[in-house]
Image (cartoon, helix red, strand yellow):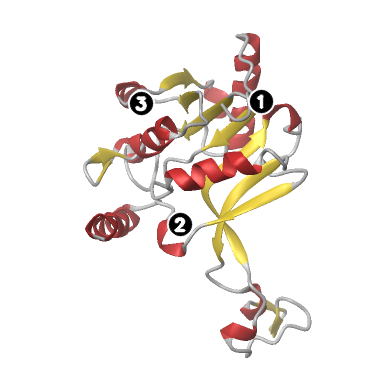
Amino acid sequence: MMKNKRVVAVIPARAGSKSVIDKNIKLLAGKPLIAWPIDIAKKSRYIDRVIVSTDGEKIAATAKAYGAEVYIRPDHLAQDNSLVIDCLRELIARLKSEGEQATMLVLLEPTSPLRSLEDVDRIIEKLLSHDSAATFCEAELNPHRAWKIEGGSVEPFIEGAIPWLPRQKLPKAYQLNGAVYGFHMDKLPLEGTSILFGEIAAVTMPQERSIDIDNITHFAIAEEIIKGISND
């Protein structure tokens, strides 16, 4: 709990990955990918329930083996074009119908296995003073160095930007890294696509822990990072 407020962690894990077959249960450093967010959530002193939302039997079995609850999502929320926020709305409604009194929800994507316990707990702590929160890392490309090409003409993407400035003179830019999201369940908008709303808080993470696994190469990179962390 956080200040007598119950917190639920939700791990969305749809079956049917096209880039890597059975991606969510593929081993990473000897542990299924889905187990990484489960283990972190179970270590948090704030999180009261850990729920995996899935449509896959193998994912469900693996999640249960690592101590998570499993909620099977409806087929219409398990399509290639399904939005996570719609899955969350449906799950929140189910939890409320069952009498769950939690007021905060933390979203942990399986594809961001290098989040730390501190990252998760800091997001929850931010919800004491904000409506929603998320983890960010420094942007891979500063938007002041981006260009647009229209009708054969080239110009800076941001009007008035000077792409030639040294990095130290450019304004700091950040991007969502997908590791941790948090929000107050009763404030989640009934419509729209964003799970960030109202007063939004940020927790920054280093780029080396901000990997978002989407293919075999990302698995290999994550393995090497984990080896480096283990040897420190």
Q: Residues within 10 Å of mark 1 (few under 14, many from 20)?
A: some
Could you tell which of marks 3 and 1 lies nearer the N-terminus? 3
* Residue type pointed to by label 2: Ser
Nearer the camera: disc 2 or disc 1: 1
Label 2 CA crowd tier, 10 Å (few <14, some 14–19, many 20+): many
Residue under pointer 1: 103
In the picture, residue 14 is in which quadrant?
Answer: top left
User: Residue at the front extreme?
Assistant: 3
Q: Which residue is mark 3?
A: 63
Q: Residue at x 56, y 67 (%)?
A: 139
Q: What's under tag 1, amino acid-wise?
A: Thr
Question: What label does residue 210 carry, if any?
Answer: 2
- Local SS, label 2: loop
Q: Please tell me whether residue 104 is drawn above or below residue 57 in the rendered image.
A: below
Q: Is residue 78 visible?
A: no
Q: Position of residue 228 (x, y in %)?
A: 26, 61
**Mark 3 belongs to which amino acid?**
Ala
Q: Earlier in the sequence, mark 2 or mark 3?
A: 3
Residue 194 versus residue 8 in the image, above or below: below
